[in-house]
Image (spheres, rainbow, N blue to C red):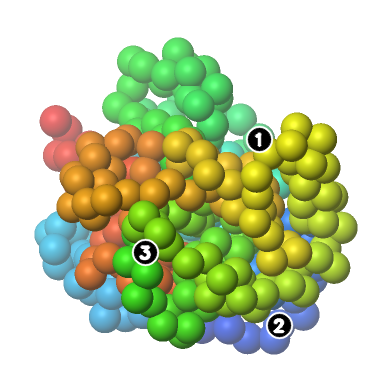
Amino acid sequence: MTLQQRINILVRLGNYMQENDEAWQSAKRKAFVNNNWFIEDFVDLAVNNIVQQLLQPEALHQLAASYKIPDTLPAPKKVGIVMAGNIPLVGFHDFLCVFLSGHIALIKPSSKDEALITQLVNLLHQWEPATQQTVAILPLLKNCEAYIATGSNNSSRYFEAYFSKFPHIIRKNRTSVAMLSGKESTTELESLADDIYQYFGLGCRNVTKLYVPVGYDFVPLINALRKYSHLTDHNKFKNNYDYQLAAKIINNEYYMTDGTILLIENKSPFAPISQVHYEYYEQADDVLQQLSGDEAIQCVTGTAAIPFGGAQTPGICDFADGVDTMAFLMDLGSGN
C-alpha cells in the first residue's frame, strides 16, 4: 500500500468509529463485559479523542510530511506492539505510527482491551486485503525485528529481558499532575475534574496529584469535583472509595472528600483509585523545574502547554513518555 492509501484507510476508519454500526456497538459492549472499567461514556470519549486528534486527514498528512515518510518502505520491518489495557484503545497511537510508517504492525492486545482493536483490525482486512500482510492481532509476538511495549514497572523488567537485543521502546508506569494557583475559575476547576476522573483515573495522563500554593482554599475545588458524583453508581469505583476511606478513618489520617474521591496530603505523584494527592508549594517555578526532570510524570496540566481539561486529548505528535515513536520507526526503516 502507498502512503496515501494508508492515510485514506485510516481516515475511513475514523469515519467508521463515529458511526452506529452494529458490529462496532457490539465490540463496545464486549469491551465492557471484558473490563467493567470501560463504561460506555469513557469508551465513547476515547474513540472521539482518537478520531478528532489522530484520524483527521490534516493531522495524518502533517505527521507524514514532518517525518518524510516514504510512499513505500523498501524493506519494512515486523514491529511487535504489546498494548496496555488501562483505558480503551490506549495502544492505538502505536498502531497508527507503525501502520502509517509502512512497517508491519503485529499487535498483542491486553486481555483487558482486545475487543475494540480486534474489530478495527478485522475491518481493515475486509476493506483492503493488502492489510492482512501489514497488520495482525497475535496471541504471542515471535520473530519480530523491533518492539514497542507498554506496561507496569514490573512487566517492563520482563520486556527489557525479552527484547533487549532488538530495537525497542519500553514504557513503564507514569502519571500526571496539576499546578494550581488558587485563582482558577469554576470552569477551570471543572475541567481539572475531567483530568482527574475520566477513565476513573486509570490512565497515565490522569491527574493523580495537585500542587497548590500555601494557604490554598480547597472548597471551590471540592465543589467542582462533584461534577462526577455519578461515578459512585459504579460498583468497582465505589468499592475502591469505600476501602480507601475506611483505611483513612481507621488510621486516623486527615482527608478531604466530595463523597467520590479523597484528597490526601502526600508527596507521591501516584495515588490509588478514588484518591488524589496534594502538596503545598511556595514557588511554582521551583516545582515546574523539579517536575521537568521527573521520569514518572507524563504531563502537567494547568500550564500554558496543557490547560486544565487537556490531559486526555494528546495530539498526533504528543508521544508517550516523551519518546518519539515515529523517529524510532523511521530510523528502523533506514536500517540504522
Give the residue type at disc 2. Answer: Asp
Q: CA distance from mark 1 to mark 2?
A: 27 Å
Of marks 3 and 2, which one's residue comes earlier in the chain? 2
Image quadrant occupied by the C terminus: top left
Q: Nearer the viewer, mark 3 or mark 2?
A: 3
Of marks 1 and 3, which one's residue comes earlier in the chain? 1
Residue depicted at 53% across the width and 44% down the height: 265
Q: Tell me: 202 left or right of 57.
A: right
Q: Which residue is mark 2?
A: 21
Q: Which residue is mark 3?
A: 180
Of residues 322 and 169, the one drawn nearer to the viewer in this rendering = 322
Vertical side of 51 occupied by 332: above or below: above
Residue depicted at 32% across the width and 49% down the height: 281
Give the residue type at disc 1. Answer: Pro
Image quadrant occupied by the N terminus: bottom left
Residue 328 x/y as whole percent: 24, 41
Residue depicted at 48% across the width and 18% down the height: 157
Q: Quadrant of residue 259?
A: bottom right
Q: Which residue is mark 1?
A: 139
Q: Tell me: 183 left or right of 267.
A: left
- How many labels sit on residues? 3
Of marks 1 and 2, which one's residue comes earlier in the chain? 2
Q: CA distance from mark 1 to mark 3?
A: 44 Å
Q: Residues within 10 Å of mark 1 (few under 14, many from 20)?
A: few
Q: Secondary structure at mark 2?
A: loop
